[in-house]
Image (cartoon, grey):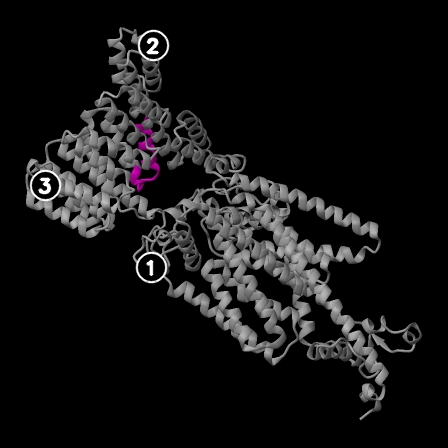
Amino acid sequence: MPANCNKFEQHPQLSRSLTKRQLSLSATETKARAKDLAAIAGCTTLAFVLYLNTLNAGFVYDDRRAILGNADVTGAAASLPQLLHNDYWGTPLMDSGSHGSWRPLCVLSFRLNFQLSQGTPFAFHLANLLLHCLATALVMLVARTLLATRAALLATGALFAAHPVHTEAVAGVVGRADLGSCVCCLLAYLAYAQHMQHRDWQTLALTLLLALAALLCKETGIVTLLLCGLSDLLRSEHSKQRLRSLSVLLAAMLSTLYGRLMLLPRPSVSFSTADNPAAHESCWWTRTLTFLYLPVVNLQLLLWPQLLSFDWGMDAIPRIRTLWDARNLLSVALYGSLLTLGCKAMRLHARSSCPSLGYADMASISLPLLRRLGGNSCQAWHELLCACQLSQLPPSRKLKTPTMQCPVPESAAEATLYVALSFLVLPFLPASNLFLHVGFVLAERVLYLPSVGYCLLFGLGFGKLWQRFRAISSKRLLLCCLTFLLCALSLRTVQRNRDWHTEEQLFGSAIAVNPPKALANLGSILSAQGRYEEAKLALEAAIGQRANMADAHFNLGIVHQQQQNFNAAIPYYRRAIQLRPQLAVAHLNLATSLLASNQSRDEEAASVLLTAARLPGHGVRDRKAHEEARCSAYLQLSALQRARGMPQQAVELLHESLAALHSPQQRATLHQRLAALHMQLEQWTEAEQQQHLALQLQPQQGAVYVSYGQTLARNCSRHAEAELWFKRALELSPHDPSAHHHYADFLEQQQRPEQALKYRLRAASLAPTNYALQAAVADALRALNRLAEAELWYRHAAALHPQAAHAHANLGAILQMRGRRQQAVECYRKALQLQPGHATSRANLAQLNVNIDVVT
């Protein structure tokens, strides 16, 4: 054995000096680790602070359907395993209207959130915020394995924490699918990074488990294993262990892909033209050029996130119809750059697969390896000394000691570049429309995981500049530029978060990007708030932008219907049905308007209701709303037939509805209506049978007992029994205002007004914003001749529903009874302004000898 191989035994002084240097370097590493952790904590705190103003937001846009209208989330579904059979929105995967998005892990998190918080938005937004903070920390841990400087690490983490394009994923509750998938993907990548060092089965199994979790959160998680494999190819040397790991990754990815595409039910999803116009473009050339351009738009959002929108459908991004469109140059530049980098990556992999190591190269590998295995710093090896040790030797020995440089492979920066590009490109591909069509043109929340790659690229470039600039002044200037950029992005993020507080703000913020969709949705929200004139303006503007929007015509019909202008509502409902024949609720409202406008049109209304009741609903997105509209159509049609003196036909219709509808709640309602019809026909046995069937379907629902009590109350000999059922309903549903309200109705029928008032007040306190219940209290007080109190309740009711003519007419009537003639006239005038044909106001003004023509 050569003498120099036992250097430490022959030179004890050198051994002691190296031990001291080991301790010094160990302390340095500890300080460096502490600084890295401080940087991670700082960026995570930045992410938390910037999104704090999302915590007081409500459920907006898709949140309502995915959370409040999803039985899998609210717990109304039969069992927890039902999550595996339904899509993200609670629709069965085999339903023709299913979106096809299978994300059971994310839906499970929603369900836990709902049970722990009773469905309050705060808890959902807090969970999203914490997930974003966790994702920020994980991005920095990933950057720590790829980037060389702490400045690059800070730049990467801060940019990810502050980027405004993340707002949709964090502020919108449905963005949790993207957050969860990103977190699981990053955890899987970190686990595989550990596996690349040790090649053990435990970290490989953990990688596969986390990759599966990413897929169960969102479909884009399928690329997790591909990211891990590419990182392995680019950053590690060829070996049998690497080949084994890559083989396992490939087998797992193919198995997962097969299971997702072949074993799970796949509905025949047909997205509308408005959602993805380019996908329905008949010209192959236009379709191809447009889809090739969409990644450029996504990249522009990452580079300059000033113009953001909740929806990019319709014509928000004009289609490219000619080769001479200037936007094609951007597409060529993007794909040319990616192709060039791809070729360089292949050459890098070819070089790394066929290494040629000399003596110095072997030393550059062996010294760090000895350090890693032994926990020591780089030591002398065959009379070579690492440069990091050379810096600590006395000046007299530096010139005499053979040295080598600490190993920084020339291809390391290139490998980092290509890994970052993989993070940017691969997660975006499933939603790019390049391989399969999806239900949107562009969605900002889809960029959450690809933005990891963008931030890594930014950090890599910032780190290169930081290393190149030697002067302190240059580094300060670079820090100032970074600070200015982060401040600008942070301000935009906070501003964008406010847009997601309410639907009115959200839709208003998108008018510049997608005017027809934004105006139509804004009009719907304004209509729901009772701001009918503003809603009318917004909806008419939306139709002017895009005349074939069924929802806009339907909502404009609702506005006219709410204003009691039924003749104006009818053509809008007809147009909505023409544009979307399966829109059952439009048929339902059309029939209501027909009956309200002219009683002689009941035959036409009956035909419309029958059509609505029998609509199959093929391809409808919201199956629950469609079935509810069908049930309402059956109920209204049976009521119409009953009013026309044809109760037997009404009974037959309800039996038909029981065969067509399957929801327990709807079937219970239908049985109750059948019971009422049998009572009218004095078929007492059949009526009780129907009530018992309703009770079997919903034994814990107080409303069913209320219905039974109302049925029995019609039989004078069974009033005592009916009251027992009302009391049973109150026991089951003590906080249900309708139970108290209907029991009060029963007590008034029994000439017990003082007791009835007690339950009226209880119902009003349980629903303080319900106009009908507040007005019922006022009516009860008026009947007891307590006019002063009745006036207060009428004023309260009118304040709740200021756009309702009858609210002002009722207030005018009580003022008239109290002798306040002028105030009563003002109330009647207000009622006639809201509804010029209001009969009660006209009659009362005539009693007061007020000229009606002058009033109107």
**Would you say the residues marked 2 and 3 are in contact, meaning their CB atoms lie under 8 Å apart?**
no
Please give the range of residues in magenta. 569-585
The image shows residue 617 at horizontal and vertical percentages of 29, 46
As shown in the figure, which amino acid type bears the numbered disc 3?
His
Please tell me which residue lies in front, 326 or 812.
Answer: 812
Q: Can residue 607 be spotted in the picture?
A: no
737 horizontally vs 221: left or right: left
Residue 79 placement, left or right of 747: right
Q: Is residue 831 above or below residue 133?
A: above
Q: Is residue 221 left or right of residue 745?
A: right
Give left or right: position of 749 versus 446: left
Secondary element at tag 2: helix
- Residue 27: which disc? none
Which numbered circle lies on residue 82?
Answer: 1
Circle 1 sits in a helix, a strand or a loop, which is it? Answer: helix
Kind of residue indicated by mark 1: Gln
| Residue drawn 82% across the image and 91% down it | 2
Q: Residue 576 magenta-drawn?
A: yes
Q: Residue at x 37, y 36 (%)?
A: 550
Residue 182 to residue 56: above or below? below
Residue 32 x, y percent position in the rendering: 72, 64
- Report if residue 319 is visible in the image: yes
Q: Residue at x 53, y 75 (%)?
A: 202
Residue 822 image label: 2
Determine the CA span between mark 1 and mark 2. 63 Å
Of the two numbered discs 1 and 2 in the rendering, the one whose residue sits closer to the viewer: 2
Whole-percent x and y of residue 760?
26, 32
Instruction: Answer whether labels 1 and 2 touch (C-beta < 8 Å).
Output: no
**Which of labels 2 and 3 is toward the front?**
2
Residue 678 numbered mark, or none = 3
Would you say residue 218 sits in the magenta stretch? no
Mark 3 / mark 1, whichever is N-terminal: 1
